[in-house]
Image: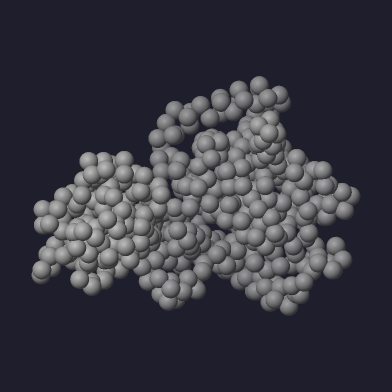
Amino acid sequence: MGSVRMARCCRQALYRCCPPLAWLPHYSGRWLRMDALAGLTVGLTVVPQALAYAEIAGLPVQYGLYSSFIGCFVYCLLGTSKDITLGPTAIMSLLVSTYGRHDPVYAVLLAFLCGCIQLALGALRLGFLVDFISFPVINGFTSAAAITIGFGQLKNILGLRDIPRQFFREVYYTFYNIAHTRWGDVVLGAACLLLLLLLQAAKGRLTQKTGALPALDRVCRAIVGFTATGQPGEGRGGGGDGAVERNSRLKKGLDRLLLSRDAVCPAELLRHFCVCTHEAFLGSPQDFGAGLAVVPLVGFLESIAIAKAFAAQNGYRVDPNQELVAIGTTNILGSFFSSYPVTGSFGRTAVNSQTGVCSPAGGLVTGLVVLLSLAFLTPLFFYVPKAALAAVIICAVSSVIDVRILPALWRVSKLDLLPFLASFLGCFWEIQYGILAGIAVSGIILLYNIARPEAKVTDGGYVVVQLQSGFSFPAAEYVRDQLGSRALEASPPRSAVLDCVHISTIDYTSVICLRELSATFQRHNLALILTNLKPKILSILTAAEIEGLRYCSTMETAGQYLRATESDQDECEKPLSWSWS
């Protein structure tokens, strides 16, 4: 029996570490066709989208493509979601712009360091840490980031140059230089915005049930719907004196895919990576500061939220810790191919799901499409106007702003408005401060609820206090005050019963509190009785040997004890004290 259990555990561990073992035995020709179709569709959308996000990151546009293909291959081997696709996103690009100094070397190094952190968290199975970030904090951050990204593209719509990227300075200098607006860019940008609005209206008319449609029809509908949300991309603008600005700083083909053209074997690739990032490594871990916490955390949070949403929609489960391993490995390997940090993309994942992907193998086709684009299409990106692509980015991030959350929070939990506003407003100053402020406010609210648990108090000749949640050390003083003020300070003083029906954990500080309370009640010739203790709590209190503290199995028994005469006290259980045994 033991060997069978050991074999089962080993098999489960192997399946958890190598997810393809779970779906490869079921792979079929139909799956291959659907995966190829979905991968091709996503590949056609990821290329312009990658250019857009490189602009947000402040990097040459080809770095968006460098960041778009490694995740496709790695996630096929390590991911647990059939739908999700890894690559650059608007939020992650904004973080790279904040911490990467608009320098490709620092951006690539940030990907490597973030990958190491994510991989370590996944190996240690610490994926649960993101559960401590509440939804209002996440929503406040994403809404502020969307406004920051959207306003940052206004300068491209207006054709303005030399506008700083810090949000408040960006707002000031955009309006200060508005007299220098280039009307060619304005007309082109407005026309693109109008076209996207028309596509969005067309998307609303498409049927939601696409499962029975022909494959080509599903692809066309997915691309129209994807375009209608403004997701596909933007390029990095250079300069020029024409009517509209176009892209510059492009490297032809795969020249910069590896950090050196001569890096063809793994040993050489590693050597050139270390040489190219040597200068950044000297001071960057300190210079990145909070970025080494914010970027890995937000990257995982964004990806796991998308993965869980599509897993629930399509009826399967994902492993958060394995997702951390997949994202971390992608960022580590991607850094050797000039990638900046990546995560799951909601838009591309939606396209992947809508076109009927059956397994993560669809990512292989997407990766090949990106590589072909790098090889043959890179010079054409020069002719993509900045204003047109800025319009696409504005439409893309507008859907991220959730204006409905404010009335919802007001109706459901007004207290949750505090972490939302702390995160939302703080992110306009500095992203890390906004996230930390939101987490801090959420933590204070959480700790306050632990330190001040709701207590139901009744008085019928003796005081009954029933805690509605746990009894841990932050609540010890509060429980002492409740029992003292209700029982000992009453006129006349009376005995008390602490109903522990909802208490599942107790710590040493709480035990000390009960010992002191028991001694205080004894000095007043009163009784303190605990009822409805769970076996685990009873064993802890018995081991603590608290003199004078009594336990009754039910409230009825406690009431009978307190009303009984001295001769009837045997109806109560023995005190929780070895000296009374």
Asked whether, in this view, residue 540 is left or right of residue 99, the answer is left
Q: Quadrant of the C terminus?
A: top left
Q: How is the image coloured?
A: one colour
- Expressed as whole percent of the image width and height from the top left, the position of residue 343 reads 59, 48
Quadrant assignment for the N terminus: top right
Residue 316 versus residue 577 in the image, above or below? below
Res. 341 in view? yes
346 relative to 275, above or below: below
Total marks in image: 0
Q: Is residue 258 left or right of residue 103?
A: right
Which quarter of the picture shows residue 499? bottom left
Residue 479 sits in which quadrant? Answer: bottom left
Q: Furthest-front residue in view?
A: 567
x 43%, y 73%: residue: 412
| Residue sitting nearer the eye, 307 or 254 | 307
Left or right: 354 as drawn, with respect to 133: right
Q: Residue at x 66, y 32 (%)?
A: 2
Q: Nearer the viewer, residue 75 or 153?
A: 75
Q: Residue at x 55, y 67 (%)?
A: 398
Residue under the point 70% across and 42% down: 19
Residue 266 screen position, x and y as percent: 68, 25
Horizontal placement of 159 versus 36: left or right? left
Where is residue 260 shown, x and y percent of the image?
A: 65, 29
Mark yes or no: residue 174 visible: no
Q: Quadrant of residue 553?
A: bottom left
Residue 49: percent from left, percent from top: 66, 55
